[in-house]
């Protein structure tokens, strides 16, 4: 954990007639806080600790880092959240949204209306196909850009609001990533990420099947420190997310996807199901988990 002091104030908002209770977290300067460059180095080192040991990767029948498109396909209504609310507040009627690491488009689709044009960036063609199909179904114009961010930033148009959900923990150079997000937003950037690494729930399973201890850092507070270290006046709101994208898969498919993540053959799915059942509910992918909304206004948005 990086060194900075945190104060928390309770705040609430009303969305569609229902109260959403969140926690606004403000990082205060600490005399012992490392410089911004050191903070980014610590983030990079923390993510490197999540690498799967080579002797385990060598036994993996399938690439454990592949994301099933079905897990990201938007089905049915999208539940509102502080992330969607923060983005919607900065969107003009008919405005544009740039969704980085868009997957099936949940972050952008939740903003229709008022959004009238959405742009998706993803490195998997299947995700972009799902994004385009969902945009067509909702009657909005759209663009898709294949590639990794920020590598494709130079050929990506700017938008009123930039959103980036559940991507940060895949980004080693988070500072440069954030800078390009901000450069492409006319008004606001909104990031959503779990308070802890999204695979933390699997730590007991790694211990059970491979007898290895997995890391627990970095965290969303560390991401906030990096963003502020880049000079942005960022705010963090914490909320409880009920369920997860794993709910888009049936229980059998969830267990098979977990097998892949654990570098196990699919024929051991029954063992994974038993191990998941034996663990506390908080370690299950569909359980409630604390999630952070981090947002800031760009220079254009403050004028």
Image (cartoon, rainbow, N blue to C red):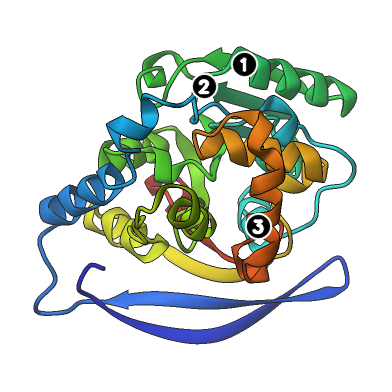
Q: Residues within 10 Å of mark 1 (few under 14, many from 20)?
A: many
Q: Nearer the viewer, mark 3 or mark 1?
A: 3
Residue 249 seen? no
Q: Earlier in the sequence, mark 2 or mark 1?
A: 2
Q: N-terminal of the two: label 3 or label 1?
A: 1
Q: Of tags 2 and 1, which is closer to the observer? A: 2
Kindly report the distance in space between the C-alpha atoms of the residues bearing marks 2 and 3: 21 Å
Q: Is residue 132 left or right of residue 51?
A: right
Q: Is residue 283 visible?
A: yes
Comparing 155 with 36, the one in front is 36
State the residue at coordinates (71%, 15%): 129
Q: Is residue 228 above or below residue 72?
A: below
Q: Residue at x 27, y 47 (%)?
A: 49
SS class, disc 3 = helix
Whichever of labels 2 and 3 marks the residue nearer the N terminus, that label is 2
Q: Is residue 216 left or right of residue 262?
A: left
Q: Could you say which disc has been placed on residue 276 in the image? A: 3
- Report the residue marked by disc 1: 144
Residue 10 vs 241, above or below: the answer is below
| Total marks placed | 3
Give the residue at x 77% y 58%: 80
Q: Tell me residue 218's x, y (percent).
A: 33, 58
Position of residue 233 measured from the top left corner of the image (x, y, whole percent): 35, 61
> Which residue sits at x=55%, y=15%?
145
Residue receiving disc 2: 61
Which quadrant of the view contains residue 85? bottom right
Residues at badges 3 and 1 in contact (C-beta under 8 Å)?
Answer: no
| Left or right, 232 with reference to 297 | left
Q: Which mark is residue 47?
A: none
Q: Secondary structure at mark 2?
A: loop
């Amino acid at each position: 954990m990086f060194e900075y002091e945190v104060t928390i104030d309770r705040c609430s908002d009303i969305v569609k007639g229902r109260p959403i209770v969140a926690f606004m977290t403000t990082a205060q300067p600490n005399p012992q806080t490392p410089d911004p460059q050191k903070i980014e180095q610590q983030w990079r080192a923390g993510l490197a600790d999540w690498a799967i040991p080579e002797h385990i990767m060598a036994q993996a029948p399938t690439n454990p880092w592949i994301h099933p498109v079905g897990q990201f396909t938007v089905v049915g209504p999208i539940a509102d959240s502080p992330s969607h609310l923060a983005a919607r507040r900065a969107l003009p009627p008919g405005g544009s949204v740039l969704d980085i690491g868009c997957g099936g488009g949940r972050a952008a689709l939740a903003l229709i209306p008022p959004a009238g044009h959405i742009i998706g960036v993803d490195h998997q063609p299947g995700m972009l196909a799902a994004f385009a199909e969902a945009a067509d179904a909702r009657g909005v114009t759209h663009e898709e850009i294949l590639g990794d961010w920020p590598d494709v930033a130079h050929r990506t148009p700017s938008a009123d609001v930039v959103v980036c959900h559940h991507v940060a923990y895949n980004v080693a150079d988070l500072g440069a990533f954030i800078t390009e997000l901000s450069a492409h937003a006319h008004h606001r950037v909104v990031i959503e990420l779990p308070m802890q690494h999204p695979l933390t729930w699997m730590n007991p399973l790694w211990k059970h099947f491979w007898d290895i201890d997995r890391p627990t850092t970095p965290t969303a507070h560390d991401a906030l420190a990096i963003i502020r270290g880049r000079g942005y006046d960022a705010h963090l709101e914490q909320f409880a997310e009920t369920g997860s994208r794993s709910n888009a898969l049936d229980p059998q498919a969830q267990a098979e996807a977990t097998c892949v993540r654990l570098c196990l053959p699919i024929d051991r799915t029954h063992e994974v199901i038993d191990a998941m059942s034996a663990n506390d509910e908080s370690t299950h992918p569909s359980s409630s988990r604390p999630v952070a909304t981090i947002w800031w206004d760009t220079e254009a948005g403050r004028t």
